[in-house]
Image (cartoon, rainbow, N blue to C red):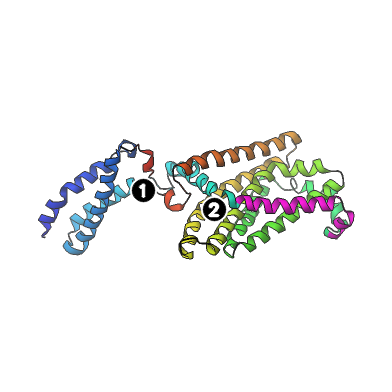
Amino acid sequence: MNLDRFVATHQQTWHRLDQLARRKPGSLSADDIATFVADYQRTSTHLSMARTTYADPDLTARLSQLVAQSGATLYGSRPRTLAGIKRFFVETFPAALWHLRWYILVSTVVFMSVAVGLGAWVANSPRALDAAIPPAIQEALVAGDFVEYYSEKPSGQFFAEVGFNNIQVGFLAFAVGIAAGLPTVYVLIINAANVGLAGGLFHERGLAEVFWGFITPHGLIELTAVFVAAGMGLALGWSWMVPGDRTRGVALRVQASRALVVVVGLIAVFGIAALIEGFITGAPLPTWFRVGVGVIVEVAFLAYWFVLGRRAARRGLTGSLSQADRVVWDRVPSA
């Protein structure tokens, strides 16, 4: 087929694709969408033929522009756009959290079991407390080191340092999950032990309100983010150990795609926790106000997770990175 006949044969397809690409996705019917996808695939093939068979620069440029324009419509606005960012936080990230909820529950149970169990033990056993925390350090903590930690540095500097540290801890729990999830459990246990020992010390000294007054404001949302990161680590480890009817490589890639979504979302969550810890926890504000901020933020995040996550899951979203980049055709009513 010569060049003129090639253009004449496919001109109608290109024109139709151009017209559909200029319309908003919400205005397309189910038949329009099917036609659009088919024409996009055909035109992509035509572009390849124009480059290799006909070597016509004008036709190649024309089809390249058409394929690029159509691809932008087909795959939606990129994450750099406001629409993409909104879709990520309203649909993709909540969907990822929803699909990981049971792994996150496991990480929460592991952490809380160790923290509460160890805290209760040292709070009721002075010998265990002395064995776990040297007496000199105990005295320093209750004398003011614990409280001063949250206010001894400028809020901005403390916010930056805490935010970086929180992200490190959370992502460490996530990253080591590939090793069958065991290192993730270890990271959880170590951090749970630190929290449990501190809480047990203050309870043993009759200063429980001090501990909870300075831990609760930022700790609720911060620990929730850690549980999410650890849950993602456990999911990676489980997908490698028990891939189901898929190969280990495929199962791991599916979870890894979701993991990238969780990583981006948790940066925002850890940032919120750091803001509270840097500007609220150590501020000279009433305890009820500081604790109230922490509770409100935690409840808001859980509502965001379960309401938007369940809604996204019902629409078939799984929180994978590939879905984050596609146009949401399922918003369009079927014919």
Q: Amino acid at mark 2?
A: Val
Label disc, if present, on residue 49 of the rendered structure: none
x, y percentage for residue 248?
49, 65
Highlighted magenta segment, given as a residue range: 104-131
Q: Which residue position is annotated with label 1?
A: 75
74 sits to left or right of 314:
left
Q: Position of residue 43 (x, y in %)?
A: 23, 53
| Distance Cα–Cα, label 2 vs label 1 | 22 Å
In terms of depth relative to the viewer, which is nearer, 217 or 224?
224
Residue 293 horizontal side relative to residue 70, left or right:
right
Q: Main secondary structure of the magenta part?
A: helix
Instruction: Kindly tell me whether residue 36 is visible in this rendering.
Output: yes
Residue plotted at (51% across, 40% down): 308
Instruction: Please give the residue where the numbered disc 2 appears in the rendered image.
Output: 263
In the displayed structure, would residue 301 be above or below residue 126? above
Q: Is residue 129 magenta?
A: yes
Rendered position, 99 above or below 57: above
- Up the image or down, 249 lies above or below 286; here it is below
User: For the residue marked with disc 1, what is the amino acid?
Assistant: Tyr
Crowd around label 2: few <14 · some 14–19 · many ≥20 (10 Å): some
Residue 298 position within the rendered picture, expressed as x and y whole percent measured from the top left: 64, 40
